[in-house]
């Protein structure tokens, strides 16, 4: 069976995580100005939970370089399960320990925003990756 190496996809995956983190930080700062610390903290935690889940997936799937295809598919399943688990655990911890200061709409809104970054950034990143790949093939 052929080994698969995905350096371009690794770059895309970590780029999505970076975009989630940047959006979370930007939203937290922008929300602090008009609404104060509790809203900004809720936004940071909600976006941070979404970002942490994406990071868990990326770390698990792309921790090794070249893999056999079945191993890579298995890594994606394990990564998605870890993403789900990290998200649930972090929500439970945050909701259990910080419920007096949380603003639920801001917490969940920022989580959804971080989740949507994945769907907004990924298509463009994949198009760039594909054009780079086909550009390399044309040069050979």
Image (spheres, grey):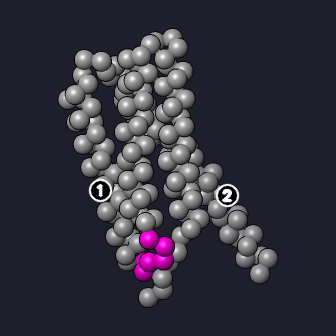
Kindly tell me whether residue 112 is visible in this rendering.
Answer: no
Marks 2 and 1, how far apart at CA? 28 Å
List x then y, in percent, for residue 76: 38, 64
Q: Which residue is mark 2?
A: 128
Q: Is residue 108 left or right of residue 91?
A: right
Looking at the image, which residue is at 67% across and 58% down? 128
Element type where label 2 sits in the image: helix
Q: Is residue 23 left or right of residue 41?
A: right
Looking at the image, which residue is at 77% across and 76% down? 138
Question: Which label belongs to residue 81?
Answer: 1
List x then y, in percent, for residue 125: 61, 54
Q: Earlier in the sequence, mark 2 or mark 1?
A: 1
List x then y, in percent, for residue 20: 50, 41
Q: What's drawn in magenta, residue-wise? A: 64-69
Which of the pair 100/120 is nearer the observer?
100
List x then y, in percent, for residue 95: 24, 29
Q: Is residue 104 positioned above or below 76 on the image? A: above
Is 66 colored magenta in this rendering? yes
Element type where label 1 sits in the image: helix
Pointer 2 local density, CA inside 10 Å: few below 14, some 14–19, many at least 20? some
Question: Which label belongs to residue 24?
Answer: none
Looking at the image, which residue is at 54% across and 37% down? 22
């Amino acid at each position: 069976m052929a080994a698969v190496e995905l350096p371009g996809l690794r770059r895309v995956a970590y780029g999505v995580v970076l975009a989630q983190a940047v959006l979370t930080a930007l939203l937290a700062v922008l929300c602090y100005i008009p609404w104060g610390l509790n809203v900004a903290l809720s936004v940071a935690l909600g976006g941070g939970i979404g970002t942490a889940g994406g990071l868990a997936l990326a770390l698990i799937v792309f921790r090794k370089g070249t893999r056999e295809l079945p191993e890579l598919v298995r890594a994606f399943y394990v990564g998605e399960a870890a993403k789900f688990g990290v998200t649930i655990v972090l929500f439970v911890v945050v909701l259990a320990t910080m419920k007096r200061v949380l603003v639920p709409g801001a917490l969940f809104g920022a989580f959804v925003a971080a989740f949507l970054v994945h769907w907004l950034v990924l298509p463009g990143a994949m198009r760039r990756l594909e054009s780079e790949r086909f550009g390399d093939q044309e040069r050979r």
